[in-house]
Amino acid sequence: MSIEVSTAETTTPAIRLHVNDNIVIARRPLKAGAELGDEGVTALGFVGSGHKIATRAIATGEPVVKYNTVIGFASCDIAPGDPVGRDNVGFRDFERDYAHAQGYIPVDLLPEAERASFMGIVRPDGRVGTRNYIGIISTVNCSATVVHAVADWFTEERLAEYPNIDGVVALAHGIGCGMELTGEPMALLRRTMAGFIRHANIAAAIVIGLGCERNQIAGLMQEQGLEAGPDLHTFTMQETGGTRKSIEAGIAAVKEMLPQANRVSRTQVSASHLSVGLQCGGSDSFSSITANPALGAAVDLLARHGGTGILSETPEIYGVEHTLTRRAASREVGEKLIERIRWWKDDYNAGRDTQINGVVSPGNQMGGLVNIFEKSLGSAMKGGTGPLMAVYKYAEQVRESGLVFMDTPGYDPVSVTGQIAGGANLIAFTTGRGSMFGARPVPSLKLATNTAMYRRLEEDMDINCGVVMDGEKSIEEMGREIFALMLETASGKQTKSEVLGVGRYEFLPWQIGVVG
């Protein structure tokens, strides 16, 4: 789904997204009595920017339709011109035709000679990084202080002799003990840790444990096939002599790693080596009109060049999952996605006051989103229009190119942690309200949905997709600009988040299972 907004249309007070819709979107705040131009209706009350207005009578129980997709049902009779929101739109589940793989069309790949390129860091095993970090990772919360102290010691001044190193990053978390010893909770944590240790943006890593935790270093190493060596050191605080001595040992180990880690250079590589985690946070109604479909257009381009887009946030595709299963490469891929949706609904979130059960965050509501169906409608657009090639569990290694899906929560730091563990070497993050986000060791691009927010938060936003609303660019033009910025960023251009130092505390593995 996409929308064209021409310069001439920017004078109209509301935006029609599809001919079959029974609502339009207010382009700017509208007072009661405002005429809606070609719609032939008058606003019957105040309507905030990005909020919805009925263009015809909608009877109680009748679907409310946006982008020709059901986003809820009228909880009372709605008159033409009425504001449409939580007060008059109800949420309930409804049957959807998954039509597995019936709309599958393979990606029209460009010949290798015609594909775009970027300046990447090629590792000995052929993996390609976009940044060059040394990672300090904790097995358990009990070693988090040591991990941060080691990383913090390596300031820009102390790393000045090593210009090819982007930094030393602490990868500390709040779990690792008081949890199930076996099963998916422990397996998930360990594959997340291993994904970061092996990540193409990590030149070398140190794993620091306490010594008595349930997530033992030996178990991690054996289960994940990791081996200690010059670029992977391990030790425990209890054996090393406590906090101070462990910090000293960590600093000494990093110093040994620095010369070798610095011996890298960027070389020209195909865009097929680019793997982009797709995120949205602090969404508003303009997310589905500007930034998300524009990012989707960029992902379609990326897929044609052989690269990968990782769509995630399972609760935020609920209600529109049928638009993905129809494009799935096979019935198996489509059914795997539906199995994850059902797990979220029937097991993980059953009876819980979470967004997959209807109510989105206060910020989303203020931005004009009425429920999870409407949020999902915009969220799924980040994946573009191409085929869905694979579905992965959280933090599994992504092997397929093109559009893939990874099962993650909607909570951005947890979701991005899984994407990076799976191999994402770039994050593209759309926001309408203004989320501040970074995720070392991977650069994060911030895409603003509207010009007003972009101007207010320009220090944090990398690109303004609000120009689509302003009539200055089409979705396709914006997609090409985003794709070009992806390549520049992958080549070393710093993002706004990197300049500000954002991303030091966003390593957050998904905590599932019993805490005991």
Image (spheres, rainbow, N blue to C red):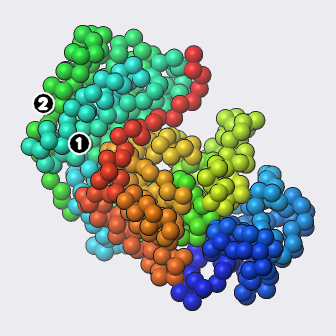
Q: Nearest the camera: 435 or 302? A: 435
- Residue located at (53% from left, 53% from top): 281
SS for callout 2: helix
Q: Whole-percent x and y of residue 406?
A: 52, 47
Q: Label 1 belongs to which residue?
A: 167
Q: Is residue 282 left or right of residue 268?
A: right
The quarter of the picture where residue 286 lies is bottom right
Q: Few, some or many C-alpha atoms within 10 Å of disc 1 (few <14, some 14-19, many ≥20)?
A: many
Helix, strand or loop at label 1? It is strand
Name the spot of residue 99 as percent of width and height, x first.
Answer: 70, 61
Residue at 24% from the left image edge and 38% from the top image edge? 168
> Hey, what amino acid is under mark 2?
Glu
**Quadrant of the rendering where the C terminus is positioned:** top right
- Residue 82 is labelled as none
Query: Is residue 426 something one can see in this rendering?
Result: no
Q: In percent of the image, x 66 and y 80: which residue is there?
A: 13
Residue at the disc numbered 2:
256
Res 74 seen here: yes
State whether residue 500 is above or below residue 117: above
Disc 2 from disc 1: Cα separation = 15 Å
Q: Nearer the viewer, residue 221 or 410?
A: 410
Question: Image height check: is 358 above or below 145?
Answer: below
Query: Looking at the figure, which quarter contains the N terminus?
Result: bottom right
**Mark earlier in primary sequence (2, 1):** 1
